[in-house]
Image (cartoon, rainbow, N blue to C red):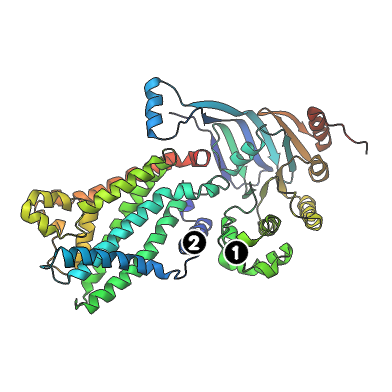
Amino acid sequence: MRREIGTRTEIQTNSDIAISVKGLHKSFNLPTEQAFGIKQAIFNRLRGVKGYKEQKVLKGLDFDIKKGEFVGIVGRNGSGKSTLLKILAGVYYPQKGDIVINGNLIPFIELGVGFNPELTGRENVYMNGALLGFSNKEMDAMYDDIWEFAELKPFQDQKLKNYSSGMQVRLAFSIAIRARGDILLLDEVLAVGDAAFQQKCNEYFQSLHDKGQTVILVTHSMENVRRFCNRAILLEDGKIVLDGEPDKVASAYNKMLGIVEKTK
Amino acid sequence: MSIPRVLNRKNRILLSELTKTDFKLRYQGSVLGYLWALLRPLMMFAILYLVFSKLLKIGNDIPHYPVYLLCGTTMWSFFTECTMQGIQSIIIRGDLLRKISFPKYIVVVSSTLTAVINLLINLVVVVVFALINGVTPSWHWLLVLPFVFELYLLSLGIAFLLGSINVKFRDITSIWEVIVQALFYAVPVIYPITMVANTSTLAAKVILLNPIAQAIQDIRYNLITTETVTTWNFVQNQLIAIIPILLVAALLIIGAFTFRKKSKFFAEEV
């Protein structure tokens, strides 16, 4: 099975383009029947059955993101938002097309990647920090701040499996916001914790917005798009249908979903 | 993948943290904890010693036979642990691969490094046993290290090769378990190679061309007794005697290339 491969290059230049995407295509080969295991693979080959079905997820995306832009990516479930984010993050390979990442990119596909329920909060903080590229020494320096922000200090030596899910997310978020990069990729991580913690999160995003951090945010919340983004991209069926003013994109999205907007 | 990226700071941090976590998790929830790293191989040795040395009376003609046996079982455990962990590591760490981007080989290397830590602990036990048993210390002991390294490279090559196939065809794990069982009897760990040589010289030569057998015999030769039969002193033809080394190199290269080619799609397939 031969697959074409696009390119994803990371560079560090002074150009004001942070991310450039040209002709990006991506499809997945989804197994049709039980195509796992050697026996089935041999049978499929003998019968001339492919054993998988090609599912096109992204069908030719072109866009540039400038430094300092706070871009919201919106669209229905299955429109390709998360796949796009994972390709930008370098988790998936672009099938066709060229991607250039200019600067240091920090992806948050999910909060608390690498969290292990059997380890203590302390150990998980160091592990998660390592995934963000922090050494033990750097983690030592910001350790107390992380627990302070998460408001979970008394639990730091408890195993993570004894945390409530809300507590886990708060801890993960507190570590995540320490990451420093030129470009941040965020996938649906705004809505965590209770109202008080939500407030803290919003302050963090506001601060990103204010200091002109380059951010790509995948979200379903049009309120956040209008509030933080200065550009939005609407995806539908693997294609860009609208790219521009957050307000217009949010309206188009709501219209597409048949949501009647409340008058402001 | 360019050379500077391979060992850059971020990857080093990740590798050491993953290794630490793997090691911690291995003995989580057990009362004796890390002690099991020592106890498990010692117990395996005790069983083999009772059965083969005491009941079947094998190896009585070899000086320091208990240490000879312990050394063999330690190296064998290292090989099986290294390959089993390495082959499964990509699936076990699938969660990470699906969510962040980093050089995938780190996952395999970190899981095999746990086996290396275990081996280092066990080597201390072997050395202590050797001293108690009256083996005279010598600078030859240092020559053990290159052969341990050879065994590690072999395990790594196998882990890269089979691990990358295992992502799609999970049967590999089960197949490898069977192969390991068979290999155990094809390698002179519990029986001395002289036993085979007495019946058939050719069979003994073939057995010694297996890199695992060659490495274990060389380690015994340098650590315990120069009476050990090694590939080098048993297979006279030197061109044939280097076959084990070539096999290790070939497996490592094939493994690395296969892994490199397949690792791009691990995130989608795992």
Percent coordinates x, y for residue B261 in the rendering: 42, 39
Percent coordinates x, y for residue A98 in the rendering: 57, 34
Check the picture and name the quadrant holding the N terminus of chain A. top left
- Name the element at disc 1: loop
Taking A180 as reference, is B236 left or right?
left
Check the picture and name the quadrant holding the C terminus of chain A. top right
Percent coordinates x, y for residue A132 in the rendering: 60, 56
Disc 2 chain ID = B
Say whether residue B105 is visible.
no
- Farthest residue toward the front? B55
- Nearest the viewer among B35 and B260 is B35
| Marks 1 and 2 in Cβ contact (< 8 Å) | no
Q: Against A59, is A247 above or below?
A: below
Say whether residue B249 is visible.
yes
Find disc 2 in the rendering and name its residue.
B25
Q: Amino acid at mark 1?
A: Lys
- Image-quadrant location for residue A99: top right
Q: CA distance from mark 1 to mark 2?
A: 12 Å
Label number found at residue A159? 1
- Name the element at disc 2: helix
Label number found at residue B248? none
Percent coordinates x, y for residue B161 in the rendering: 36, 44
Taking the spot 39% from the left edge, 48% from the top edge, the residue there is B87
